[in-house]
Image (cartoon, coloured by chain):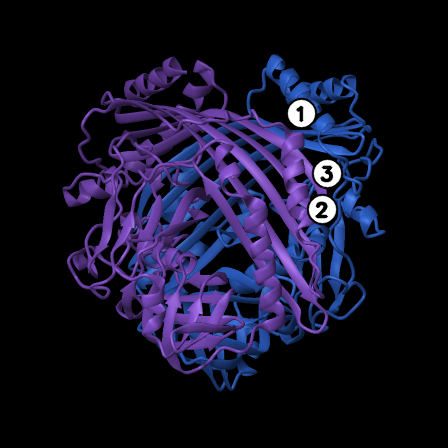
């Protein structure tokens, strides 16, 4: 059966069984990955996967399933099992009926195939790019993703989306404590330059040689694109209405209020042509769109599906998730200054190129810490003074957002292990950031 | 299914692979989630597929599909084999695996209540009863809470081109909760936690969840209303089992993973401050013994054979303060001319087996709790935590206490808010002077690999005492 027929079968069987709402997505993935370390390929991976995910609602009783056996008999059996579960569960009074279709979707067909030999060549380009700048060791991951998604709902939504993307994340080392990390991601092969990622990672690693212990304290800091993207992913997560309602957000009750300095404008966009996570529709079949979440520092919108929109007396933003609204591609509007201008603002500050392991003590209050990783530099009088190590940002997210001072005029797309949602981001200069380190 | 696995291995070797293995795996999962007292959804996962690893011209390939037809499997293998061949042309050092005796075994975790035998109504009733506990008579409210109950069953056939053949069946159950305590004059305090075992529903019954969550609610309310600022001087510290466990996991288990040490995970999960030459070197006081043991019955990280077909064993990572053993798979052990100690795990059929922990804990010492406290005139007891992190070489770590007490004259006197331990791994292990007798475990999901693989683990140990630790404040 085709993806069309599989989704239709789920909807037909669900309705036949008395469901008030049924939504089904059939996702087919052709994925290839090359991982490398110590300048060599360590493993080559290939996946061919097909999954059907479906939601069945019976008198506001919500049940959700995911299956990989796509035979007709198995699908029918799974639908009937899920119906039984829906019937025996309790109503979710916050549930809102699926939006009525049909919808018109804007087609963004940017699916490309790629030769496996080309992926190996790209990997070598990245490694050689880093080595040519002076890296001693290079590690990373190259990913090619080709995903087809078919949606069908019992309320008349029907759509098909295809998309492919290329991503590479490169980490270059000049020694075990001096490293740099850089990424490239693109929806089209013509926009993908893995050797540039290798070179950029190695440039940071070279600069980071011979780090000394950093000193804790309050600093004006420049966050590189990796760091700012990581933190803004946390901010966007805090705008998902489910998280707002669950205590997982420091943005509860802040709609229409100032939550950041006027430098910050944040957008979620599922339609952008070069967004590697763009899709024509969300999981309820609602067309994706461009949503201004924070405009000039004012919180304008949460991310919604139909049910959270009802609860918050709003309308869907095309970000379903049947339960948890999810972002598509995050865009942080650029500022007016080039990177050198940002540097020149710092008399005694820090430049943090990467981070990892962001964890919250209290999501509601926004208290968190994250560990600086790879190149970390002390800035004196507008110039890189010294490579340092051993610091972590230990601060409060609302306070940091209010302290954003400047954003650079150049943006980069970031997506890697620590940045799940693709994010187009500038560098950010943030004032009075608290940095801590091991006390013994 | 066995036929499919065997033909996948045969096909891989027919393409010129010098080694091939296949895992056919079926994962079943049932979940029920409640938010703020309202059932959100119930549902299930039913997935099955095959994961194949092959070595061709010294290059490693991994192929996976859920199209369980001969044709679908062959297509996927061809794709991975083709990439591996191209990669081989530029490899200076061919990948080798350490020798493995041929194992043929069948193992399973018995369940008294079989997977799927508990209906959804009963699960919702349980969660509703737990949720009612949040209506306490206090000026502290619990406006946000998420409760979730999950059961899983993993069935697997593993076979390789050397003749090893293993079948296994593991049920797991878990209960997760996230709660926010709120009082207008005090703000919020939050707790995320999980209980989990490799077991049937009987584990859920044994946990007495209403009593357990009641205690958690009362503690969080007390933290919010009563906790005072922590001391900022150097002081003695007792870490409760929950904190001891995360320390053992983050600061011993991870840096002792041989693939990190050798740089294979450098791009994402990172490397290690430990190197192979540090075997036999002191890293902690003589009281420190840290174990990783997948064979603990009903543990969340339980297995008897790993996902390379190697028999599982108890690993003594740190013995009396000395680095004793690293966690290995067949690839890392081959490079050192030793045998794998069975640490290769994959979370599902579509993930490559890589080196993982299982149940990592500090072994018991000689002290009862009273003795641990008695020798402290002024100190801090950190029983649980929320925020934590560690750098990607596993050297600088931070744990922010949640339930924590000021100790005076050998007794916990009052609650303190958000004490911070931020110190290096050697400093931490060297400052331990006494280890308790009573071990307990916490359940966790450990992240590593690309794509990410969250594997079930236990972390644990007894209460431990650290001397002269500088405490920070979040």
Residue B327 seen in the current view: yes
Depth check, mark 1 against mark 3: the one in front is: 1
The residue sitting at 23% across, 64% down in the picture is B283
Q: Is residue A143 above or below residue B279?
A: above
Looking at the rendered structure, the secondary structure element under dot 1 is: helix
Depth check, mark 3 against mark 2: the one in front is: 2
The residue sitting at 71% across, 46% down in the picture is B37
The reply to whether the C-beta atoms of the residues labelled 1 and 3 are less than 8 Å apart is no
Q: Write down the residue under mark 2.
A: B37
Q: Write down the residue under mark 3.
A: A281
Marks 1 and 3 belong to one chain: yes
* Colour blue, chain: A
Give percent across and percent down for residue B64. Answer: 44, 28
Q: Chain of mark 3?
A: A
- CA gap, disc 3 and disc 2: 31 Å
Left or right of A253, for residue B1: left
* Colour purple, chain: B
Residue A82: give its label.
Answer: 1
Crowding near pointer 3: few (<14 within 10 Å), some, many (20+)? many
Q: Earlier in the sequence, mark 1 or mark 3?
A: 1
The reply to whether the C-beta atoms of the residues labelled 2 and 1 are less than 8 Å apart is no
């Amino acid at each position: 059966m085709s993806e069309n027929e599989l989704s239709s079968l789920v909807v037909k069987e669900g309705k036949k069984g008395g469901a008030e709402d049924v939504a089904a997505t059939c996702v087919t993935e052709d994925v290839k990955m090359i991982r490398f370390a110590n300048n060599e390929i360590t493993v080559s991976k290939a996946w061919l996967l097909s999954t059907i995910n479906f939601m069945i609602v019976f008198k506001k009783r919500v049940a959700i399933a995911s299956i990989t056996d796509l035979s007709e008999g198995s699908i029918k059996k799974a639908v009937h099992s899920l119906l039984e579960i829906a019937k025996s569960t309790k109503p979710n009074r916050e549930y809102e009926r699926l939006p009525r279709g049909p919808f018109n979707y804007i087609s963004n067909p940017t699916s490309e195939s790629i030769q496996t030999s080309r992926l190996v060549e790209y990997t070598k380009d990245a490694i050689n790019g880093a080595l040519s700048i002076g890296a001693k060791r290079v590690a990373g991951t190259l990913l090619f993703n080709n995903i087809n998604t078919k949606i069908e709902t019992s309320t008349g939504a029907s759509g098909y989306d295809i998309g492919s993307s290329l991503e590479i994340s490169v980490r270059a080392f000049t020694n075990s404590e001096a490293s740099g990390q850089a990424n490239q991601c693109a929806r089209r092969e013509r926009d993908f330059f893995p050797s540039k990622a290798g070179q950029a990672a190695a440039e940071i690693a070279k600069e980071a040689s011979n780090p000394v212990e950093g000193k804790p304290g309050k600093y004006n800091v420049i966050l590189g694109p990796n760091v700012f993207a990581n933190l803004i992913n946390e901010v966007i997560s805090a705008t998902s209405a489910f998280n707002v309602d669950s205590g997982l957000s420091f943005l509860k009750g802040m709609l229409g209020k100032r939550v950041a300095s006027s430098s910050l404008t944040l957008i979620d966009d599922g339609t952008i042509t070069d967004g590697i996570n763009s899709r024509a529709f969300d999981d309820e079949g609602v067309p994706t769109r461009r949503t201004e979440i924070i405009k000039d520092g004012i919180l304008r919108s949460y991310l919604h599906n139909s049910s959270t929109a009802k609860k918050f007396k709003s309308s869907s933003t095309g970000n379903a998730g049947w339960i948890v609204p999810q972002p598509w591609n995050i865009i942080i509007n650029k500022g007016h200054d080039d990177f050198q201008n940002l540097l020149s603002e710092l008399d005694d500050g820090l430049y943090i190129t990467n981070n990892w392991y962001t964890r919250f003590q209290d999501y509601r209050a926004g208290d968190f810490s994250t560990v600086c990783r790879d190149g970390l530099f002390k800035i004196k009088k507008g110039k890189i003074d010294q490579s340092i190590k051993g610091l972590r940002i230990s601060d409060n997210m609302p306070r940091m957002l209010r302290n954003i001072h400047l954003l650079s005029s150049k943006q980069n797309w970031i997506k890697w292990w620590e940045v799940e949602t693709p994010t187009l981001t500038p560098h950010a200069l943030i004032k009075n950031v608290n940095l801590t380190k091991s006390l013994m | 299914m066995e036929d499919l696995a065997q033909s996948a291995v045969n096909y891989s070797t027919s393409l010129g692979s010098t080694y091939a293995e296949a895992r056919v795996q079926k994962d079943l999962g049932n979940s029920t989630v409640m938010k703020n007292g309202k059932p959100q959804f119930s549902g299930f996962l039913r997935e099955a597929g095959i994961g194949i690893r092959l070595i061709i011209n010294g290059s490693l390939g991994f192929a996976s599909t859920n199209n369980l037809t001969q044709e679908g499997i062959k297509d996927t293998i061809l794709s991975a084999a083709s990439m591996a061949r191209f990669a081989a042309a530029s490899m200076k050092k061919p990948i080798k695996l350490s020798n493995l005796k041929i194992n043929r075994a069948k193992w399973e975790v018995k369940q008294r209540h079989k997977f799927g035998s508990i209906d959804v109504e009963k699960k919702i009733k349980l969660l509703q009863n737990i949720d009612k506990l949040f209506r306490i008579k206090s000026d502290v409210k619990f406006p946000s809470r998420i409760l979730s109950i999950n059961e899983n069953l993993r069935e697997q056939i593993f076979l390789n081109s050397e003749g090893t053949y293993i079948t296994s069946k593991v049920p797991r159950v878990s209960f997760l909760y996230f709660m926010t305590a709120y009082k207008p004059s005090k703000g919020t305090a939050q707790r995320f936690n999980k209980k989990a075992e490799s077991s049937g529903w009987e584990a859920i019954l044994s946990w007495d969840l209403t009593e357990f969550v009641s205690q958690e609610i009362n503690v969080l309310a007390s933290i919010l209303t009563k906790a005072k600022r922590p001391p900022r001087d150097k002081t003695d510290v007792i870490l409760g089992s929950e904190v001891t466990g995360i320390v053992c996991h983050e600061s011993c288990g991870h840096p002792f993973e041989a693939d990190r040490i050798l740089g294979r995970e450098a791009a994402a999960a990172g490397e290690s401050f430990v190197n192979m030459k540090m075997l036999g070197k002191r890293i902690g006081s003589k009281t420190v013994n840290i174990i990783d043991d997948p064979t603990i019955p009903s543990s969340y990280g339980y297995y008897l054979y790993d996902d390379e077909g190697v028999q599982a064993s108890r690993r003594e990572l740190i013995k009396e303060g000395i680095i004793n053993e690293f966690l290995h798979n067949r690839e890392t052990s081959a490079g050192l001319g030793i045998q794998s100690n069975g640490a290769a795990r994959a979370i599902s059929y579509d993930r490559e087996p890589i080196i993982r922990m299982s149940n990592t804990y500090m072994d018991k010492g000689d002290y009862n709790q009273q003795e641990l406290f008695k020798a402290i005139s002024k100190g801090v007891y950190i029983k649980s935590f929320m925020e934590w992190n560690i750098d990607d070489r596993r050297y600088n770590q931070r744990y922010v206490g949640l339930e924590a007490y000021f100790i005076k004259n050998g007794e916990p006197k009052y609650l303190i808010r958000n004490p911070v331990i931020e110190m290096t791994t050697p400093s931490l292990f060297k400052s331990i002077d006494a280890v308790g007798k009573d071990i307990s475990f916490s359940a966790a999901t450990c992240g590593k690999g690309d794509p990410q693989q969250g594997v079930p683990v236990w972390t644990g140990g007894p209460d431990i005492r650290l001397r002269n630790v500088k405490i920070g404040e979040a």
